[in-house]
Image (cartoon, rainbow, N blue to C red):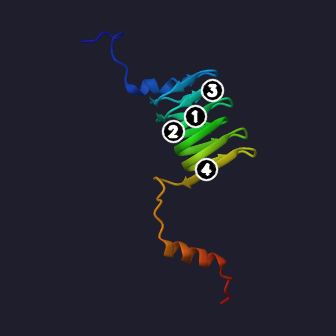
Amino acid sequence: MFSDKQKPRPMQEFGGQPNRIEKNTKIKGDITSEADFRIDGKLEGNVKTSGKVVIGKDGLINGKVECVNADIEGNFKGELYVSQLLSLKSSANIEGTVDVAKLAVEPGATFNASCTMGKGKPSNIVSNSSNQNAQRAKNEPAKVS
């Protein structure tokens, strides 16, 4: 049916080649990839990858990112979902919401985000009575038995 040269390659082989948006490049739109992604330019849109996302020092993403790992040196504004490790370098500037399993932050990084650590998306439903009881428990003096 296919000769050796014409056989379609399995999807895994595409995962090894990283994608790159160079400095002075601006893109509007959504990106889906099986491979790692490096952004040194500007992206207004969403990125979804089963690999790693790297935002270089001059890079900017304004949108939603879903990935396995992320290294950020530049700017990010939006929603960030990292299933494993998010590493923020000292020049990073993050704004928005972050859901991550593990977080590493270098001194100097700006992290103005609502952050949830662990699996699954954050739950915004909190009952007032349980929240008040938790607050009261924090403010009570320690009891000696």
Give the Cα separation between the discs numbered 1 and 2: 8 Å
Q: Does the residue at mark 1 contact the one at mark 2 (Cβ under 8 Å)?
A: yes
Question: Compared with residue 18, is residue 71 higher up or lower down, i.e. above or below?
Answer: below
Q: Where does label 4 land, which residue? A: 113
Q: Does the residue at mark 1 contact the one at mark 4 (Cβ under 8 Å)?
A: no
The residue carrying pointer 4 sits among few (fewer than 14), some (14 to 19) or many (20 or more) residues within 10 Å by Cα, namely some
Q: Name the mark on residue 40.
A: 3
Q: Amino acid at mark 4?
A: Ala
Q: Amino acid at mark 3?
A: Asp
Question: Compared with residue 19, is residue 137 higher up or lower down, i.e. above or below?
Answer: below
Q: Residue at x 51, y 27 (%)?
A: 28
Give the Cα separation between the discs numbered 3 and 1: 10 Å
Which callout, 4 or 2, points to the residue nearer the camera?
A: 4
Q: Name the mark on residue 61.
A: 1
Label located before the other in sequence (2 or 3): 3
Label located before the other in sequence (3 or 4): 3
The residue carrying pointer 1 sits among few (fewer than 14), some (14 to 19) or many (20 or more) residues within 10 Å by Cα, namely many
Q: Which element carries disc 3, helix, strand or loop?
A: loop
Front residue of this view, candidates 19 and 115: 115
Give the Cα separation between the discs numbered 2 and 3: 15 Å
Give the Cα separation between the discs numbered 1 and 4: 15 Å
Across and down, in percent, residue 13 comes to 43, 24
Give the Cα separation between the discs numbered 3 and 4: 22 Å
Q: Which element carries disc 4, helix, strand or loop?
A: strand
Across and down, in percent, residue 119 comes to 48, 53
Q: Amino acid at mark 1?
A: Ile
Q: Where does label 2 land, which residue? A: 65
Q: Residue at x 48, y 60 (%)?
A: 124
Q: In the image, 7: left or right of 103?
A: left
